[in-house]
Amino acid sequence: MNNILIVVPTYNERENLPRMAQRLLALPVAVDLLVVDDNSPDGTGKLANELAAKHPTIHVLHRTEKNGLGRAYIAGFKWALERGYEFIFEMDGDFSHNPDDIPILLDAAKDADLVIGSRYLGGIRIINWPLSRLMLSKSAATFVWIVTGMPYTDPTGGYKCFRRTALESLDLDAVHSNGYSFQIELTNKLWRQGNQIVEVPIIFTERARGRSKMAGHIVSEAFFMVWRLWFQNGCRRSPRNRPPATG
């Protein structure tokens, strides 16, 4: 077992999973892959089992129903903590997140509790998004900053590396959000606790195969979650425990 785990939730990702596994196995750093499959009707779970049977670093966690990205990640995080992984990644399984960026995020994690792969740090690096989708994402980032005070350019981004200790500090059973709001909630909880959080630039590419899982209810959930996080922080726009200064 390696000390790095990549958690990849899947739902109807049969076209992408074999290529994703191949790319991860070919990285210059040794990683394990955990596929968290939500009972995909296209047979993704069965394919994941076949890959795991061939490669000891590939693991599969089957869930009986599709009840949200956040729930899939929570299940994957618990699985990782039970087995002692030191660095736990979350990333999409559709190649919108480039597997080759994993060593970059991992290097940044040497001095951080959470590393966020940012689509907006130092400029916009998104390929094949319509203007409406880009405006929604950028508006969400601005809204999160205005309400919560979190100083991060991409709070809704889903390409992250957590240190084990950071995830252990969270009550994962108390996290109930999904989608955009899940990403915002976990980052906000760690920020409020004074954890060291850094961003590194990535290039995000809209999926070329399969269908996007984006839906309207994800946006509304995120809107209300942001206000809830602000209230949880005592209507403050700064953490009670500030992270230590760096440099």
Image: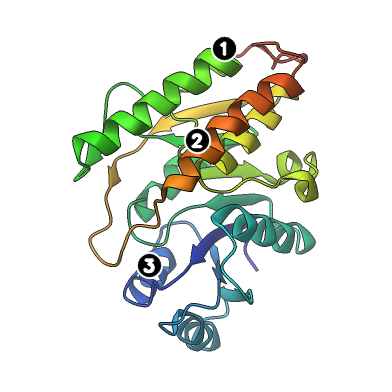
Q: Quadrant of the N terminus?
A: bottom right
Tag 1 near tag 3, CB within 8 Å: no
Residue drawn at point x = 55 percent, y = 78 percent: 39
Residue drawn at point x = 62 percent, y = 24 percent: 227
Specify the label residue 20 is tagged with: 3
Q: Residue 8 or 185: which is nearer the viewer?
A: 185
For disc 1, the neighbor class at 10 Å (few under 14, some 14 to 19, many from 20) is few
- What distance separates the C-alpha of mark 1 from that of mark 3? 36 Å
Residue type pointed to by label 1: Gly
- What distance separates the C-alpha of mark 2 from that of mark 1? 19 Å
Is residue 194 in view from this perspective? no
Q: Tell me if residue 13 comes above or below residue 45 in the rendering.
A: above
Residue type pointed to by label 2: Ile
| Local SS, label 2 | strand
* x, y percent for residue 59: 59, 75
Which residue, given by chain and number where applicable, does mark 1 sit on?
247
Nearest to viewer (mark 2 / mark 1):
2
| Local SS, label 1 | loop
Is residue 117 in view from this perspective? yes
| Local SS, label 3 | helix
Specify the label residue 116 is tagged with: 2
Residue drawn at point x = 20 percent, y = 40 percent: 130
